Image: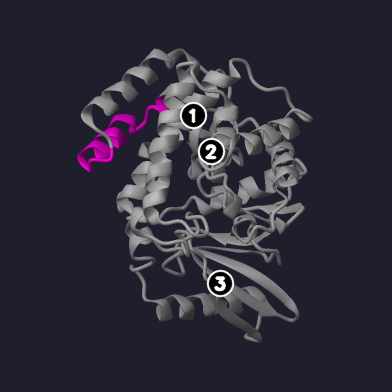
C-alpha cells in the first residue's frame, strides 16, 4: 500500500501524478473493472438483482451508480498503480464529520485492501442533487446563502482535532481507530515538496526564476506562522464541485480523499482559490456564528492561499488544464484554459501581496 508520508497533495505528489487526470483510469480496462465490481455488489446485496451504470465523474476516481430494490447507491473506485488505501481514512472522516452536524453521505462499505478486487472501493448513499458548481455555472446558485452555509459547516468540522499533522496514517487508523497525522509538526507538512513544486513551475516556464526566489523568500519570512500546537480537520479540496445541494441549500460535502490535519485557515484559503472577496466574506460571516477566527487570521489566510495556489498551478500545468475549454468543471462558462492560466497567475500575485499587507480579502 502507498504511504502518504511524502505527499503534500495527492494529485501532484503521487508517484504517477497526472496519469488519471490526463488519461483517466488507464491501468485497468473498464470491462474488467465492471466485472469485478459486479462480483463485489453481488456479495454486498446477496443477489444479482441490481443494475450498474457509470456515473461520469470528472475527478480521479471511477464512479458508478447501482440500483437495488428501489434504492440507489453511489460507488467510488480508486485503481491507481500506487494502490492507495486512503479510502479507509476517508470513510472514517465522513462518519466523524457527519457527527458534528455537517451533511455527508453515509458509507455502507469500504475496502482498500485489494485482496479480492484490483481496486479500492466505497459504497455510499446516493445524494440526488447536483454539485453546486454545476448550479453556479448555470447562474442558478444563491451564492450569498450558500457561502454563509459553507462557513457554518466548515466551522463545525473544525471541531475535530486529530493528533499530529498532514495526511492520516491508515495503518494506525485500523489499529487504534484514531486519526493520526503522518507528521509531528505542521511546518514539516506545509513545507513538504514546496521547493520541488516551485522548481516544476519554473522548469515549465509558468514561473520565472526571480518569481520562484521571491516566493521562497516570502514563505521563509512568515515561517513563524507554521508553529501550530494542534491541528484541526481540513477537507483540503474544498470547492463547489465537492458539495451537493440545491440553489439555496447545502445537502452534502463530499470527496474527503485529500483530508489532513492542518491549519483552520486552510479550507477558507482553498475557497479563495476560486471565489471573490464578497463570497469569502459571506463564508467568514457564517463561520463566525460557530467559531472565532484564529489568531493572526489574515497572514495565515494569505500564506495558505499562496501554498494552495502553487499546488493548483502544478496540477493545472502538469495535467494540461490550460488547454481545456468550458465543458471542463474548473473553467467557467464562456471561458477557456488560457483564462484559467491568467486567473491562476493573478491569484498567486494577490496572495503574495496580501501576505505583504498590500491586499485585503475585498480585493479577491
- Residue tagged by mark 1? 304
Segment tinted magenta in the rendering: 188-206
Q: CA distance from mark 1 to mark 3?
A: 33 Å
Residue appearing at x 36%, y 31% in the figure: 192
Residue at the spot 44% in from the left edge and 59% down from the top edge: 60
Q: Residue at x 58, y 54 (%)?
A: 241
Q: Circle 3 is placed at which residue position?
A: 55
In 3D space, how far apart are the residues under numbered discs 3 and 2 (Cα atoms)?
A: 26 Å
- Does dot 3 land on a helix, a strand or a loop? loop
Q: Are marks 2 and 1 in contact (CB under 8 Å)?
A: yes
Say which residue appears at 24% left-offset and 35% top-offset: 199
Image quarter of residue 128 = bottom right
Q: Earlier in the sequence, mark 1 or mark 3?
A: 3
Which quadrant would the C terminus be assigned to in this image?
Answer: top right
Residue 144, relative to residue 22: is it above or below? above
Q: Nearer the viewer, residue 157 or 209?
A: 209
x, y (%) of residue 195?
29, 30
Figure disc tally: 3
From where the camera sits, is residue 189 visible?
A: no
Q: Is residue 27 left or right of residue 187?
A: left
Q: Label 2 vs label 1: CA separation?
A: 8 Å
Is residue 279 left or right of 304 when viewed as pictured? right
Residue 164 in sight here = yes
Q: How is the image coloured?
A: one colour
Decide whether residue 204 is among the magenta residues: yes
| Mark 1 burial class by Cα count in 10 Å: few <14, some 14-19, many 20+ | many
Residue under numbered circle 2: 270
Sequence order check, earlier mark of 3 and 2? 3
Amino acid at each position: 500500500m502507498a504511504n502518504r508520508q511524502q505527499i503534500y497533495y495527492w494529485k501532484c505528489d503521487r508517484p504517477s501524478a497526472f496519469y488519471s487526470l490526463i488519461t483517466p483510469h488507464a491501468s485497468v480496462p473498464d470491462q474488467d473493472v465492471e466485472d469485478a465490481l459486479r462480483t463485489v455488489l453481488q456479495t454486498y446485496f446477496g443477489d444479482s438483482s441490481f443494475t450498474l451504470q457509470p456515473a461520469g465523474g470528472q475527478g480521479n476516481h471511477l464512479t458508478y451508480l447501482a440500483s437495488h430494490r428501489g434504492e440507489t447507491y453511489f460507488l467510488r473506485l480508486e485503481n491507481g498503480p500506487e494502490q492507495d488505501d486512503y479510502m479507509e481514512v476517508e470513510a472514517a472522516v465522513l462518519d466523524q464529520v457527519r457527527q458534528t452536524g455537517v451533511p455527508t453521505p453515509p458509507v455502507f462499505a469500504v475496502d482498500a485492501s485489494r485482496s479480492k478486487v484490483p481496486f479500492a472501493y466505497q459504497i455510499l448513499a446516493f445524494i440526488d442533487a447536483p454539485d453546486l458548481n454545476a448550479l453556479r455555472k448555470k447562474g442558478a446558485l444563491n451564492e450569498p446563502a450558500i457561502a454563509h452555509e459553507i462557513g457554518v459547516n466548515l466551522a463545525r468540522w473544525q471541531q475535530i482535532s486529530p493528533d499530529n499533522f498532514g495526511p492520516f496514517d491508515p495503518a494506525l487508523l485500523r489499529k487504534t481507530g484514531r486519526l493520526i497525522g503522518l507528521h509531528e509538526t505542521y511546518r514539516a507538512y506545509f513545507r513538504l515538496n514546496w521547493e520541488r513544486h516551485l522548481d516544476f513551475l519554473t522548469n515549465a516556464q509558468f514561473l520565472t526564476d526571480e518569481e520562484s526566489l521571491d516566493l521562497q523568500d516570502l514563505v521563509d519570512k512568515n515561517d513563524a506562522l507554521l508553529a501550530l500546537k494542534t491541528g484541526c480537520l481540513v477537507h483540503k479540496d474544498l470547492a463547489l464541485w465537492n458539495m451537493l445541494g440545491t440553489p439555496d441549500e447545502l445537502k452534502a460535502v463530499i470527496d474527503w480523499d485529500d483530508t489532513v490535519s492542518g491549519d483552520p485557515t486552510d479550507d477558507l484559503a482553498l475557497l479563495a482559490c476560486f471565489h471573490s472577496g464578497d463570497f469569502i466574506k459571506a463564508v467568514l460571516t457564517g463561520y463566525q456564528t460557530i467559531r472565532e477566527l484564529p489568531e493572526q487570521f489574515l497572514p495565515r489566510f494569505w500564506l495558505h492561499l499562496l501554498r494552495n495556489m502553487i499546488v493548483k498551478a502544478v496540477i493545472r500545468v502538469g495535467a494540461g488544464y490550460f488547454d481545456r475549454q468550458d465543458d471542463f468543471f474548473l473553467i467557467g462558462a464562456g471561458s477557456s484554459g488560457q483564462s484559467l492560466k491568467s486567473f491562476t497567475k493573478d491569484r498567486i500575485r494577490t496572495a503574495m501581496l496580501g501576505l505583504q499587507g498590500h491586499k485585503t480579502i475585498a480585493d479577491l
